[in-house]
């Protein structure tokens, strides 16, 4: 138990209920690290926009936000009969599902809410609305437990690599931290667990890729880790090769948005390049994945839809003035890439650590 850390987690909690549970309260991640501001989302358009614009982001947090959102929206459906209620519910669910395409947790959470409605169809509409609030809460609570379990397995790996009197060099890409989940993150969970198990912040040295173009590593991961008291560096993405060659990094943990049945893993753009470099220098590369991120219906990475984003994110979004001429094409702006399963040392789920062949490993853990 680390009270200071828990207070920080509470302050930056990604998703919670707004007043009287009539809205979803999120921390606006587009404003971090310079301003910690919370906003309330009451309409379906606001929830959609917050997910689309990355005010709330990270695969598990998107799932929790969508579940909370659907509970709040359902409460205002004025219908007494199941058929009318379900028709409107389904329209809202389908609308939220269009906010972002890659993170499978979004669809998984929406489907769980849908299953909750259908399972309770014999009950009154008022009771179904209550059940939806409870289900959203369960999704959030499960996510906290899942992150802890991923963290414990990851911490087991850190212990095998730690040398007495030397900070352990760990690298991560994008943000798969508390801001991307309900509490501990996935890729950062091993580090938070290390603190809970008595390591000090200077027992580790975490290297955060800045993560162009939206800078989740610099703005979010570094923000989190610095608050947790962990020794933190930020480097530009294109410095990875030299950094890994230097021997300062002993292990890499990344999150993911969708893992296909064969272990191919979609994560923030730049992840696959990092995995290729890690293989070259023989550095273990782990993907941290709640089982809700594993999509057994998608055979391999070819089947994972990759979100393409606004060209303005490359040209001007984080700059005072445009940093590329207006005539230059910046339309190639994929939000994610797919890391080939051959490059992944292991996939850490809450149910255990998986090694290739991944389809069999997932099945052995009951992931179907
Ligand atoms: O576009 P983002 O910021 O939502 O991308 C997030 C990532 O790529 C994370 O690594 C992934 O969602 C895992 S979060 C535990």
Image (cartoon, rainbow, N blue to C red):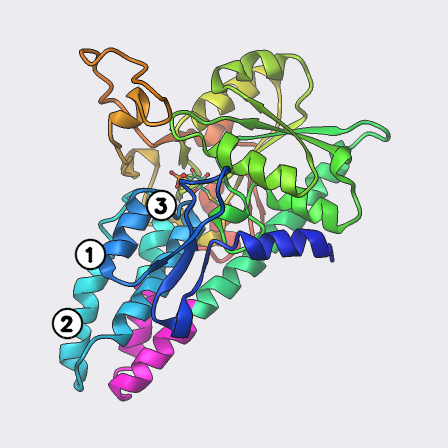
Pointer 2 and pointer 1: residues touching (CB < 8 Å)? Answer: no
| Quadrant including the N terminus | bottom right
Question: Residue 170 appears at what percent x and percent y?
Answer: 65, 30
Distance from disc 3 to disc 2, alpha carbons, whole Å, reads 25 Å
User: Is residue 13 shown above or below 247?
Assistant: below
The mark nearer the N terminus, 3 or 2, is 2
> Taking 123 as reference, is 114 above or below it?
above
Instruction: Confirm or deny contact between disc 3 and disc 2 (CB under 8 A).
Output: no
Q: Earlier in the sequence, mark 2 or mark 1?
A: 2
Distance of label 2 from label 1 (alpha carbons)? 12 Å
In this view, the residue in front, 25 or 248, is 25
**Could you tell me which secondary element the residue under label 3 belongs to?**
loop
Q: Which residue is mark 1?
A: 95
Instruction: Please state the horizontal and vertical placement of residue 299, each as a whole percent of the image.
Output: 33, 41
Q: Is ligand 1 closer than 8 angstroms to the Cβ of mark 2?
A: no
User: Start and end of the magenta stretch?
Assistant: 111-136
Quarter of the render that holds ligand 1: top left
Residue located beneath label 2 in the image: 87
Is 115 placed left or right of 262 in the picture? left
Residue 301 in the magenta stretch? The answer is no
Mark 1: few/some/many CA within 10 Å (<14, 14-19, 20+): few
Location of mark 3 (residue): 103
Which one is closest to the eye, mark 3 or mark 1?
1
Residue 226 in percent (x, y) is at: 64, 37
Q: Main secondary structure of the magenta part?
A: helix
Left or right: where does residue 204 sit relative to residue 14? right
Check disc 3: other Cα within 10 Å, few if <14, some if 14-19, many if 20+.
many
Q: Residue at x 19, y 82 (%)?
A: 82
Q: Is mark 3 within 8 Å of ligand 1?
A: yes
């Amino acid at each position: 138990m680390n009270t200071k850390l828990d207070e920080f987690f509470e302050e930056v909690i990604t998703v919670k209920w707004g007043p009287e549970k009539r809205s979803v309260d999120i921390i606006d991640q587009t404003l971090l690290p310079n301003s910690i501001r919370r906003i309330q989302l009451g309409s379906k358009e606001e929830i959609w926009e917050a997910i689309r614009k990355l005010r709330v982001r990270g695969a598990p947090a998107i799932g929790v936000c969508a579940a909370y959102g659907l509970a709040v929206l359902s409460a205002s459906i004025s219908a007494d009969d199941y058929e009318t209620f379900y028709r409107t519910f389904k329209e809202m669910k389908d609308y939220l599902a269009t906010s972002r395409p890659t993170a499978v947790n979004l669809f998984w959470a929406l489907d769980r809410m849908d299953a909750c409605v259908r399972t309770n169809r014999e009950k009154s509409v008022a009771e179904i609305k209550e059940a939806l609030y409870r289900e959203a809460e369960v999704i959030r609570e499960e996510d906290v437990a899942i992150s802890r379990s991923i963290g414990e397995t990851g911490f087991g790996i850190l212990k095998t690599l730690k040398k007495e009197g030397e900070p352990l060099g760990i690298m991560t890409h994008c943000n798969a931290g508390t801001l991307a989940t309900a509490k501990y993150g996935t890729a950062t969970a091993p580090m938070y667990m290390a603190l809970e198990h008595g390591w000090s912040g200077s027992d580790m040295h975490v290297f955060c890729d800045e993560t162009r173009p939206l800078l989740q590593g610099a703005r979010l991961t570094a923000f989190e880790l610095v608050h947790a008291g962990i020794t933190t560096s930020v480097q530009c993405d294109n410095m990875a090769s030299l950094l890994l060659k230097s021997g300062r990094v002993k292990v890499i943990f990344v999150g993911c948005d969708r893992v296909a049945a064969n272990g191919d893993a979609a994560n923030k753009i730049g992840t696959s390049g990092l995995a290729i470099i890690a293989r070259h220098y023989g550095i273990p590369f782990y993907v941290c994945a709640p089982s809700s991120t594993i999509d057994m219906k998608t055979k391999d990475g070819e089947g994972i839809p990759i979100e393409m984003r606004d060209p303005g994110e490359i040209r001007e979004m984080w700059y005072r003035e445009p940093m590329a001429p207006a005539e230059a094409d910046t339309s190639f702006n994929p939000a994610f890439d797919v890391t080939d399963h051959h490059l992944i040392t292991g996939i850490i789920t809450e149910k255990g650590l998986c090694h290739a062949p991944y389809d069999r490993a997932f099945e052995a853990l009951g992931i179907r």
